[in-house]
Image (cartoon, grey):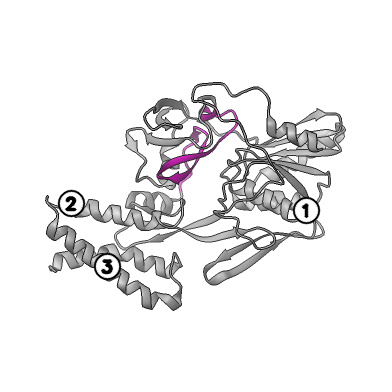
């Protein structure tokens, strides 16, 4: 093997070494036995490609694809980041204020977890489960969630074009979305029927717990003695916000535990000063319930503080951190994940509702049917 090829092999090996250091997929006990054969396999593959492929090989393209593949094999949020994306993280600059209201995961292409209430994406008819095949002029087949979310942001009033697939890949829909400022109100409430308050939590942020406490107090003064909390299509935001939200409802209980390398657990609990919201509560959940909202729902279910009506949630409750590589690129790696109060996996597993009700499927461009079967079932249960 030439010296040039050996340098290329060393370059592609760097992510594997980084994974071993941060605990991406090898324990310390098995790294010595398993890592070196894997590196030799990389060396053999690179040698075969450079020596046998019918056309001259663009090694940069091959290596870039290999490193994307290493990260993609872990979970949808782990990713290989280019030097430009790493610089954006290190600059710690706030994202542009303009957004289209999409939260994404990855499944071959970027896939929609949820759309924010009243956002440009929701008004355009984009729904949970849709695939975003192209953002602007760039296909998302090799685009990370991290990059995709940033490409959607921009100056309020500017536009971004997305190509959406629902169902058949032969029927893509090209949609132009105008970016808007992000709403500052996460929580709204109303009286649904005598004695039943409805709380819609559209996002989970550091301000959500305070807004929730205020809205529940208003509903109580208006006569609510029972509460329906709707966290369907509530995604993204902060996991800490979900913990703070759960502590409003759970007194003296385990909220969650945080699992990191080598099965290290950090238990998060509420105490006697928590649990200020005492109304009997029913949760509305679906596959778009993710992140802080999903952690909140798991905490209430695990402490028998609420029942949940709706669909199985997506299972997305983890934290990522940057591992920088010598050439300026980096790995955006999941380094910790959250569990349910009884210690069961939450990340990539989700939670099962107490009563399962599916939301109706809708053809692209058509209006959803009238009625809300999940909410109707919750009122029936109450």
First-in-chain label (2 vs 3): 3
Using the rendered view, name the quadrant where residue 31 is placed.
bottom left
Image spot of residue 64 (x, y percent): 28, 53
Image spot of residue 283 (x, y percent): 72, 42
State left or right for residue 195 relative to residue 29. right
Classify mark 2: helix, strand or loop. loop
User: Is residue 102 visible from the viewing direction of this image?
Assistant: yes
Residue at the image position 74 percent from the left and 31 percent from the top: 376
Image spot of residue 14 (x, y percent): 31, 65
Q: Is residue 100 magenta?
A: yes
Q: Is residue 192 magenta?
A: no
Which residue is tagged 3? 41
Are the residues tagged 3 and 1 within 8 Å (C-beta)?
no
State left or right for residue 291 relative to residue 154. right
Residue at the image position 60 percent from the left and 55 percent from the top: 346
- Residue stretch in magenta: 93-122
Which residue is tagged 1? 304
First-in-chain label (3 vs 1): 3
State left or right for residue 309 relative to residue 276. left
Which residue is tagged 2? 58
For residue 292, above or below residue 99: below
Q: Gap between marks 3 and 1, in whole Å?
A: 50 Å
Q: Nearer the viewer, residue 190 or 153?
A: 190
Are the residues tagged 2 and 3 within 8 Å (C-beta)?
no
């Amino acid at each position: 093997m030439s010296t040039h090829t050996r340098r290329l092999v060393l370059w592609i090996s760097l992510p594997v070494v980084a994974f071993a250091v941060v605990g991406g997929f090898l324990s310390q006990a098995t790294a010595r036995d398993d890592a070196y054969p894997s590196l030799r396999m990389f060396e053999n593959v690179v040698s075969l490609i450079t020596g046998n492929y019918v056309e001259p090989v663009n090694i940069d393209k091959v290596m870039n694809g290999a490193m994307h593949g290493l990260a993609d094999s872990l979970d949808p949020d782990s990713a290989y980041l280019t030097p430009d994306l790493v610089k954006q993280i290190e600059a710690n600059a706030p994202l542009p204020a303009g957004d289209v209201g999409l939260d994404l995961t990855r499944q071959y292409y970027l896939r929609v977890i949820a759309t924010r209430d009243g956002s440009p994406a929701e008004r355009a008819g984009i729904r949970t489960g849709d695939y975003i095949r192209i953002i602007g002029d760039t296909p998302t087949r090799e685009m990370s969630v991290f990059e995709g979310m940033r490409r959607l942001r921009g100056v309020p009033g500017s536009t971004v074009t997305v190509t959406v697939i629902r169902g058949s890949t032969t029927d893509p829909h090209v949609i132009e979305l105008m970016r808007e400022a992000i709403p500052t109100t996460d929580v709204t409430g109303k009286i649904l029927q005598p004695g039943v308050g409805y709380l819609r939590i559209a996002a989970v942020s550091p301000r959500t717990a305070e807004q929730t406490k205020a809205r529940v107090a208003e509903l109580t003064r208006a006569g609510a003695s029972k509460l329906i909390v709707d966290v369907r299509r509530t995604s993204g935001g902060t996991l800490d916000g979900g913990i703070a939200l759960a502590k409003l409802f759970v007194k003296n209980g385990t909220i969650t535990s945080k699992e990191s390398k080598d099965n290290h657990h950090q238990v998060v609990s509420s105490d006697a000063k928590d649990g200020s919201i005492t109304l009997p509560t029913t949760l509305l959940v679906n596959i778009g319930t993710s992140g802080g909202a999903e952690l909140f729902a798991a905490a209430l279910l695990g402490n028998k503080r609420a029942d949940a009506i709706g669909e199985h949630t997506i299972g997305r409750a983890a934290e990522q951190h940057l591992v920088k590589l010598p050439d300026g690129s980096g790995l955006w790696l999941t380094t910790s994940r959250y569990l349910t109060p009884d210690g069961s996996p939450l990340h990539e597993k989700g939670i099962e509702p107490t009563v399962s009700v599916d939301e109706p499927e809708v053809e692209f461009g058509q209006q959803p049917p009238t009625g809300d079967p999940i909410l109707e079932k919750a009122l029936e249960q109450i």
